[in-house]
Amino acid sequence: MAGALKIGIAGLGTVGSSLARIITGRANELSVTCGRAIEITAVSARDRSRDRGIDLSGMAWFESAEEMAARADIDVLVELIGGAEGPAERAVRAALDRGLHVVTANKALLARHGVELAALAEKKGVLLNFEAAVAGGIPVIKALRESLTGNRISRVYGIMNGTCNYILTRMEKEGLSFQDCLTEAQRLGYAEADPTFDIEGNDTAHKLAILTTLAFGTQIAADEIYLEGISNISIEDIEAAADLGYRIKLLGVAQQTDSGIEQRVHPTMVPRDSVIAQVDGVTNAVAIESDILGELLMVGPGAGGDATASAVLGDIADIAKSRPGEQRVPVLGTPAEALEPYRRARMRSHEGGYFIRLTVADRTGVFASVATRMAENSISLESIVQRASSTAPATEAKTIILVTHATTEASVRNAVTAIKAEDYLVGEPQVIRIERPKAF
């Protein structure tokens, strides 16, 4: 049996502590499964005095993650600090420069520096594994990087943020406002004290950028994503979606088109009877469409100490089972130097159509004016329904719900802008894309 694989863990928060407990508590099982022992020989965290329920006495303690990466007697750096810059980036670079393997759960770091870090890892002949960075315990990285080799992928999409999915689920099932659900998510630890990164879609965007590169072999392009969060979703939208046979989910979508790659993150209406519509709470789901396999949907816990630690441990096990000198799987599926420049797709017709909610003054001619603005922008309407407004007295305002046929984002936005210029609109319009998954 090979010598023990020595691990250094940078960050002993929820995930790091969970990982340490699993490795120390299942040492014998891991030794048999991996063909060698896995030992934590060094750790780094901000507060040494905090009780984490782990015996750290046999592990070297480092105040600095970067110092641990540069000096500790380890084979693998496990980076669980987070953040695109700062200690996490410096520690990962130091480890790779030294010829150490790296395992990270840091999607922000990869979205910003993934290509250059992949190039460094490949130059040094070491592994940079990051299964836990996207969708927690769902093995989507391994599927794209290894299992689907040879498949031509046309689309990757899914629910990739548990905080947003929890909020939208509670709004629908209990009729609560967005703010009430956010407050509860914070109380339960699903949302941060400052939830902006989650609810405005940034977290999903970072994950989507990584999946896009793995799926299509292009440079990571996190800044090329159309981004819209869920903070403007109202209970009125939830109810209208239900009446039309849909549920609202925050989706990240990346797809290959004739003119390039389209990446977008936004609230989306999906048919109530689709499988992805049934994914509730903090659960994540990722769908992959390809030419050989067809459609693949993976569903599982997207966050939490144990789920994320499980993905991290899987990456460590892969390193333990690898042997010096053997051919490495490219970090991003395609060798870093062979990644194609990212080419953003031209605006095209969205096949699913759009949901548009307008609150308008209750007077003659409003319906005709709205229909005219749509026609001027070549938008064909599938349906138009009037509802009593839940935010204004019935005698003063009505809610108009429009569902369009396939049309472009530009056409919809132009029509809405024209309507906003009229004097009958009350409040801000709401526009939500509709997706009709092929098989889900």
Image (cartoon, helix red, strand yellow):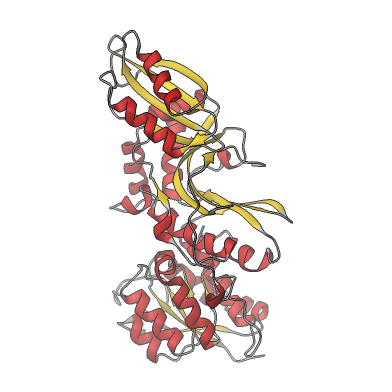
**Residue 394 placement (x, y as % from top left):** 32, 11
**Residue 410 placement (x, y as % from top left):** 42, 38
Q: Quadrant of residue 202?
A: bottom left
Q: Depth check: 426 or 387 in front?
A: 426
Residue occupying image coordinates x 50% and y 55%: 302
Quadrant where the C terminus sits is: top right
Q: On the rendered structure, is 27 left or right of 11? A: right
Q: On the rendered structure, is 294 left or right of 59? A: right
Q: Depth check: 49 or 121 in front?
A: 121
Q: On the rendered structure, is 256 left or right of 395? A: right
| Number of numbered discs overlaid on the protein picture | 0
Residue sitting at the far left = 423
Vertical position of residue 211 compared to residue 368: above or below = below
Q: Depth check: 362 or 364 in front?
A: 364
Residue occupying image coordinates x 38% and y 41%: 230
Vertical position of residue 396 compared to residue 315: above or below = above
Vertical position of residue 269 compared to residue 108: above or below = above
Residue occupying image coordinates x 47% and y 82%: 120
Q: Is residue 57 visible?
A: no
Q: Quadrant of residue 206?
A: bottom left
**Residue 226 placement (x, y as % from top left):** 42, 49
Q: Is residue 426 visible?
A: yes
Quadrant where the N terminus sits is: bottom right
**Residue 209 placement (x, y as % from top left):** 47, 60
Vertical position of residue 124 compared to residue 440: above or below = below
